[in-house]
Amino acid sequence: MNKAVFQSKSPSETLRFGKQIGRLLQRGDVVALMGELGAGKTQFIKGLAQGVGVGKSVYVSSPSFTLINEYNGEIPFYHIDLYRLEEEKEAEELGLEEYFHGEGITAIEWADRIPSLLPGEFLRVNIHYTGKQTRSIELVAKGKRYEELLNNIEFRV
Ligand SMILES: Nc1ncnc2c1ncn2[C@@H]1O[C@H](COP(=O)(O)OP(=O)(O)OP(=O)(O)O)[C@@H](O)[C@H]1O
Ligand SMILES: [Mg+2]
């Protein structure tokens, strides 16, 4: 499967769906999120982090000045937020390859700002606003690894 769509009816459903995906992630995986302001990217990533094993008591929030937050659990989890990035060139200094090809799992908000810097394979997550409390969450696999991941999703949250 190279595409899957999930309809979320609440912030907690988005979190639980993210958690389900997080449980399927492996070292070296990259999740690239796209979606307008307030779509729910950070909410989804909180779920991913829990699924990967970042402790529930560890507060996952968007990185501010650094652009990158690192959670060093058994599997490192990197949360990158490119909202403040003005042009793609600026991201060249962040050393993103080391995250993408490292031992951890990387989730990037506003990934559409670095189209040419994304790795060859990744899981794309597009979140669309469909109502005050509802969101459409579309997962698109770029590459075999992520197609396999999508085959293992259950739509129960
Ligand atoms: N079904 C839903 N799923 C996710 N968030 C929802 C949902 N319904 C309402 N919300 C609300 O939408 C907001 C989503 O915020 P969040 O910070 O996750 O968005 P974001 O895409 O990361 O925004 P930004 O572009 O500012 O980083 C929260 O206030 C959340 O409570
Ligand atoms: Mg955010």
Image: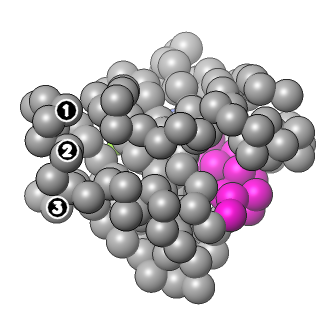
Q: Under tag 1, what secondary structure?
A: helix
Q: Which image quarter holds the N terminus?
A: top right
Given the current orientation, which residue lies at the most extreme top position? 130
The amino acid type, in three-letter code, at marker 1 is Glu
Q: Magenta: predominant secondary structure element?
A: helix
Given the current orientation, which residue lies at the most extreme bottom position? 74
Judged left or right of residue 136, residue 119 is: left
Q: Is residue 38 above or below residue 68?
A: above
Residue linked to disc 3: 66
**Structural crowding at the residue carrying mark 3, measured as other residues with C-alpha within 10 Å and reported as few (<14), some (14–19) or many (≥20):** few
Residue linked to disc 1: 88
The residue lying at 53 percent from left, 73 percent from top is 103
Give the magenta part as a residue range.
14-26
Q: Are marks 2 and 1 in contact (CB under 8 Å)?
A: yes
The amino acid type, in three-letter code, at marker 3 is Thr
The residue lying at 44 percent from left, 29 percent from top is 34
Residue linked to disc 2: 91
Sequence-earlier tag: 3 or 1? 3
**Quadrant of residue 61 in the image?**
bottom left
**Quadrant of residue 114 in the image?**
top left
In this view of the protein, which residue sits in the foreground, 134 or 148? 148
Q: Under tag 2, what secondary structure?
A: helix
- Nearer the observer: mark 3 or 1; the answer is 1
In this view of the protein, which residue sits in the foreground, 145 or 10? 145
